[in-house]
Amino acid sequence: MINRRQFIRGGVLTAGATALAPNWVYAQKDGPEYFTLAVLPDTQNYSYRHPDIYTGQTRWLKENAEKYRIPFVCHEGDIVQNNDVFEWERAVVSHKELDGNLPYGLNVGNHDFNWTWVNGKRGEMIRDVCRIDQFFPPSKFEKESWWGGCFENRNHNSYQYFDAPGGLKFLVLNIEFAPRDVALDWGTAVIKKHPDHRVIVVTHAYMDNDDTRLGDGDRGVKQYFPDDNDGDSMWEKLVRKHKNIFLVLSGHICKDSRNNFKFDTSYTETGLLTSKGDHGNDVHQILADYQKRPNGGDGFLRLMRFTPEKNEIDVRTYSPFKDEWLTASHNQFTLSYSMT
């Protein structure tokens, strides 16, 4: 098993690591200390119908970890489609490509839960009926040096660590779908215990595809758990309050939530919003969800290249399945972020 400290400084992210792949724009202008955060958007349709694409994503990340200097893989939730055993079994197979090779975090989405059924009709969502702890229990990760911990001894809320060149320390905070106040309070406590870490929040439903946070009047959260938190209330109760939060990642929305979930060709699949936190810090909030493309999403994932020398994060979208890069502005863009 790769130690999280050694993972970065012991070879994969050292200055002498393999150069970036030629497909990466402006790669030759980068200094020696870049690294790439990998992000898996909703994999539900891969677990359900296209497991080879899911495994192809994780295998590609493993095989290209040195080339792109990948220290960590985020998952944005909706691991499976129907919370069925066979889907979770497929997800386990896919993530075995990362086990022992790349640290990763998981996130639960609405499709990872069960529903009540009344007279043949779907009723209320049941938060406690999710098989993630059967197939990805906290005990699976507790011996890993990059594992931080979890809430309620379940993998619905968890945090992990990774280090980057120049002594940068990062914490990835995974927050449950439609988080309860107690989950946000737990997240606050974790952040307060790590003032020297740069915090990335990952949650399933937070952004809409019109570049706003999910809030009153939006479908996507409240119809599942009406008493719990959407993107706007997460911002108010958690995200804006901490000066070391700089990034929020989410999935879930792949259509226009204000228009009966019909496709909006301008915004479908993605969203981007940068807001000022209470301490004057910029917080980049990013949505990516490709599940409505053919083949359950065509295998597209996000690669976020951090370049400390330029204080920039370059976001790119790539499919190992198609060997294709999406180059439209909402899938390829650069963010400012101070790392020096």
Image (tube, rainbow, N blue to C red):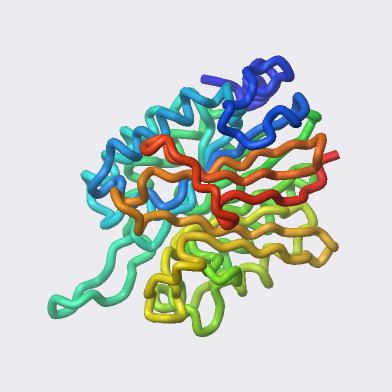
- Position of the C terminus, as image quadrant, is top right
- In this view of the protein, which residue sits in the foreground, 58 or 271? 271
Q: Is residue 296 visible?
A: yes
Q: Quadrant of residue 82?
A: bottom left
In the current view of this chain or complex, which residue is farthest to the left? 119
- In this view of the protein, which residue sits in the foreground, 167 or 286? 286
Q: Percent x, y for residue 266?
A: 50, 68
Left of 11 or right of it: where is 63? Answer: left
- In this view of the protein, which residue sits in the foreground, 28 or 45? 28
Q: Is residue 176 visible?
A: no
Left of 340 or right of it: where is 158? Answer: left
- How many tags in the picture? 0
Q: Residue at x 62, y 20 (%)?
A: 12
Q: Percent x, y for residue 78?
A: 39, 55
Q: Residue at x 44, y 29 (%)?
A: 60
Q: Percent x, y for residue 221?
A: 46, 72
Q: Percent x, y for residue 62?
A: 47, 26
* Residue 331, above or below 124: above
In the current view of this chain or complex, which residue is farthest to the bottom? 217
